[in-house]
Image (cartoon, grey):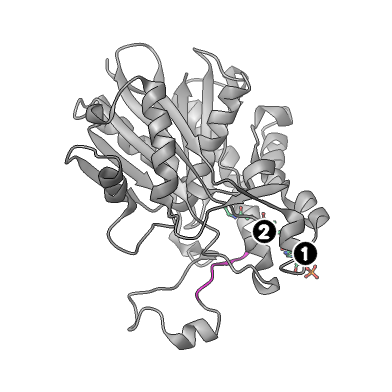
Amino acid sequence: MTRAYISGLGTYVPERVVTNDELAGLMDTTDEWIRTRTGIETRRFAEPGQGPSDLAVPAAEKALEAAGITVADIDFIIFATSTPDYYAPGSGVLVQHKMGFREIGALDIRVQCCGFVYGLSIAEQYIRTGTFRHILLIGAEVQSTTINLSTAGRDISVLFGDGAGVAVISATEEDRGILSCHLHSQGEYYKEIFVELPTTTKSPRLSSEDLEDDRQWPRMNGREVFRHAVVRFPEVIQEALDANGLTIADITLIVPHQANLRISREVARRMKVAPDLVYSNIHKYGNTTAASIPLALADALDEGLIKSGDYLVLPAFGSGFTWASALIKW
Ligand code: UT7
């Protein structure tokens, strides 16, 4: 039986480290507020001119090297991002061009914080059916240009950071890899984390009046998002366990989307597991949306927390609302 597994992982974060104190110089916030409410200590901001495709390229190079394959071996590109370089075309084709891939398909997906897990599920289907042997799955974001770095945007802007995580998903006949993926959405909550503009529902998509009214920034109902997240994370983790006849005791590590350390701690509490079972590196990078799971997975591997044969759950929750999980035998 052919399965899909992560044969290589690579990450890249911009060099510029932005501390909480630096943000406190731009808006009415404090290091103490950000640390205690979110667990975030620093995040990375891209340089002007850098888009997510630029962050993805060095991460993809490392992922290919880790997988022991070259550009010529990749059959398909999936680019998960909520902050594409351009409105059109997608960022996947930019990576295809910048890295000199063959004229393969390049699919952008926009499922925000769940982008990487949705991408895994797409890759898994193509691999398991034998359509492709190697897929490049990218999660990359440049959030720093999309957030309001003034007091009016402080509830959102202190959370987000830039970065890229890339996985090569390959075919294997071994008893390992992605065992199942579980995808959900509930669009009635689409305005709870909302980037409204530019919109095709009016012309022009973004007017000077919109900019004067500060309507170009993301909006979020943080408390409502939090309330749903702490329910959906445990639910979708349990769904993955049930689908595979496993219990939480079989899981070596939960590597969730990094939304807020308090969300991860609450998930651990509700699942009655030690806080350390839910991996966190949010203190370093903040919330990097589609990039956060591969960035966390790479750090957990570097820290020696995952070994061959371990069961992992990768759950996510975010804008939409969408939520998802993947169960992986490493
Ligand atoms: O990937 C999914 C994306 N989003 C999330 O996962 C977000 C989920 N939600 C959260 O993480 C939390 O709701 C936040 C971190 C966004 C906010 O934490 P909270 O404990 O829910 O705070 P709050 O929204 O209830 O605000 C408490 C106070 C408010 O002041 P008042 O009304 O009590 O006077 C806010 O205005 O904190 C104020 N506040 C801030 N103060 C200092 C909001 N943002 C800040 C800030 N610095 N950056």
84 drawn magenta? no
In three-dimensional space, the C-alpha distance between marks 2 and 1, rounded to whole angstroms, equals 9 Å
The answer to whether the residues at label 2 and label 1 have Cβ atoms under 8 Å apart is: yes
- Residue placed under numbered mark 2 in the picture: 158
Residue 203 lies in what quarter of the image? bottom left
Does 1 appear above or below 48? Answer: above
Q: Quadrant of ligand 1?
A: bottom right
**Circle 1 Cα neighbour tier, 10 Å, few/some/many (<14 / 14–19 / ≥20):** some
Residue 249 in view here:
yes
The amino acid pointed to by label 1 is: Thr
Residue 238 in view here:
no
Q: Does the residue tagged 1 have its C-beta within 8 Å of any atom of ligand 1?
A: yes
Q: Which residues are magenta?
A: 216-222
Residue 22: give x, y in percent of width and height.
73, 59
- Residue placed under numbered mark 1 in the picture: 29
Residue 124: give x, y in percent of width and height.
32, 31
Q: Which mark is residue 139?
A: none
Taking depth in this image into account, of 295 and 279 the one nearest to the observer is 295
Taking depth in this image into account, of 320 and 144 the one nearest to the observer is 144
Horizontal side of 65 relative to 159 (left or right) equals: left
Residue 198 lies in what quarter of the image? bottom left
Residue 143: give x, y in percent of width and height.
52, 57
Residue drawn at (45%, 86%) of the image: 208
**Circle 2 Cα neighbour tier, 10 Å, few/some/many (<14 / 14–19 / ≥20):** many
Asked which secondary structure carries label 2, the reply is loop
Q: Residue furthest bottom?
A: 209
